[in-house]
Each structure stands twice: as structure tokens, then as C-alpha cells.
Amino acid sequence: EVQLLESGGGLVQPGGSLRLSCVASGFTFNIYAMSWVRQAPGKGLEWVSVISGSGGGTYYADSVKGRFTISRDNSKTTIYLQMNSLRAEDTAIYHCAKIFRFAPVDTYYFDYWGQGTLVTVSS
Amino acid sequence: EIVLTQSPATLSLSPGERATLSCRASQSVSSSLAWYQEKPGQPPRLLIYDASNRATGIPARFSGSGSGTDFTLTISSLEPEDFAVYYCQQRSNWPLTFGGGTKVEIK
């Protein structure tokens, strides 16, 4: 059974930093690209970042580029999101999501999601 | 950035009725579009990928169609558990983008 468990959310002041983690289990982790998707309170879904299975390729939404860094440790089946220079508009639930792979290509659709961790940026 | 516009924002229907949800892209995404279902307190679930392919375990009452800029998610006969918010998502171009969602509510 695929499981994704996020942690690291909390309350942070504007301009501050936070590091999110997502521990994965139930699949061959190093094959799959992984992603972060966020949802502001009462709002829709917003893709944040994606990292390839090897960790060698990363993509970011323009809204976080230069402030957020995605990384992974395949030995720990974990991905991370380092968030710096946080703004009020970064307040959201951050979901870790597994990228659906279709023989043998990364589709960049999301087939499994974690419950998410809440990040609140406020003074 | 490709903008996805979903309509209607809210669909009020009764169980057993047919639901038709629309997603329109600001430029062609070919068939590179997915649909997700989100229920309160749960993460989204992948329903349809590449416009018309059901994901694993998704009931046959869910179907997707379209290509280019216009896409449709159809629920042939609404079950009580289908009342939820539905999102479309494109993977044709970076950045990946989602539509604003359609809420299917009980009439």
C-alpha cells in the first residue's frame, strides 16, 4: 500500500523559513518522480515543484522559484521542500504527491497524495 | 502559463442524475489532461488521465473526453459518494496547472 506522510508544517513569520518532509512507503521510491502541491484555505490546487526519481531534475512554479528548493534522499525514501523568504500567500496545506509513471515515462499526473501539512505564514 | 477554466463552478444534481463537467484550456494541451476528485478531509484522487483513461480502481460511471482545448468529465449516474469537488490538470506545458474546480452538490 502506497503511503505518503508529510511533516514539518507550522506557524512562521513572514520572511522566515521552514523545511517540509514527506516519507514514502509501499513502492520502489527511486523510480518515481515526486511533487509538492499546495492548497490555500478554501481555495483550489496549485502545483509547487517536482523532482525526478534520481533527483537530477527539478521544476518549480514561478510563484516559488528562487525561494523554495525541492530535494530527495532515496536511501530514506523521503522528499523535502526547503521554503525560504516565506510570504503570507504561501499559507496553505502542502501535499506530497507521487507522479504516475506509465511504462516507462513520468506522466506528471499525481496518482497518490498525502494528507498534507499546514503551513501558516503570519506575524 | 496554460490557464484551465472549469465550468460550472457549482453543479446541483440529485443521485442517479448525469453530471457533465467542463474544462477549457487557454491553449491546446493535446490529450494531456487529468481529472481529480476531492472530498472534505481527504487528498485528491486521480480519476482520469490523458483525457479519457480511467485510473486504477475508478468505476466505469466516470468517463472523460476531449482534446485540444475542450474537455469533459461525465459521471453517468451520480452515486452518493460522488458529491465532491472535481479538478482538471494539464501536463502539456510547464508549469503544471489546475483548473479552479467544480463542486458537485446534492440538489
Image (cartoon, rainbow, N blue to C red):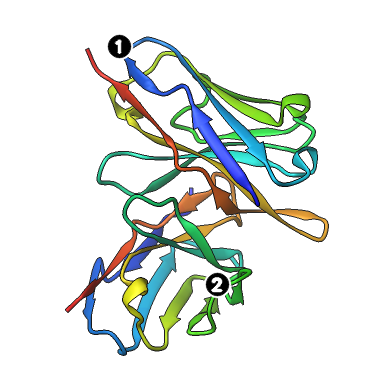
Q: Which residue in the structure is indicated by mark 2?
A: B68
Q: Secondary structure at mark 1?
A: loop
Residue B28 in view: no
Subunit ID for the residue under disc 1 = A
Numbered circles on residues, count: 2
**Disc 2 residue type?**
Gly
Q: Is residue B60 above or below residue A58?
A: below
| Dot 1 and dot 2 within a common chain | no
Q: Which residue in the structure is indicated by mark 1?
A: A13
Outermost residue on the left side: it is B107
**Disc 1 residue type?**
Gln
Subunit ID for the residue under disc 2 = B
Q: Position of residue B104 (x, y in %)?
A: 28, 71
Asked if residue B105 lies left or right of residue B77, the reply is left
Q: Is residue A65 above or below residue A33?
A: above
Q: Is residue A68 above or below residue B51?
A: above
Q: Position of residue A73 (x, y in %)?
A: 72, 24
Q: Secondary structure at mark 2?
A: loop
- Residue at 58% x, 40% y: name it: A4
Q: Quadrant of the C terminus of chain B?
A: bottom left
Q: Is residue A46 above or below residue A100?
A: above
The one nearer the camera, A76 or B61, is: A76
- Residue at 38% x, 88% y: name it: B77
Circles 1 and 2 in contact, beta carbons < 8 Å: no
- Residue at 54% x, 44% y: name it: B95
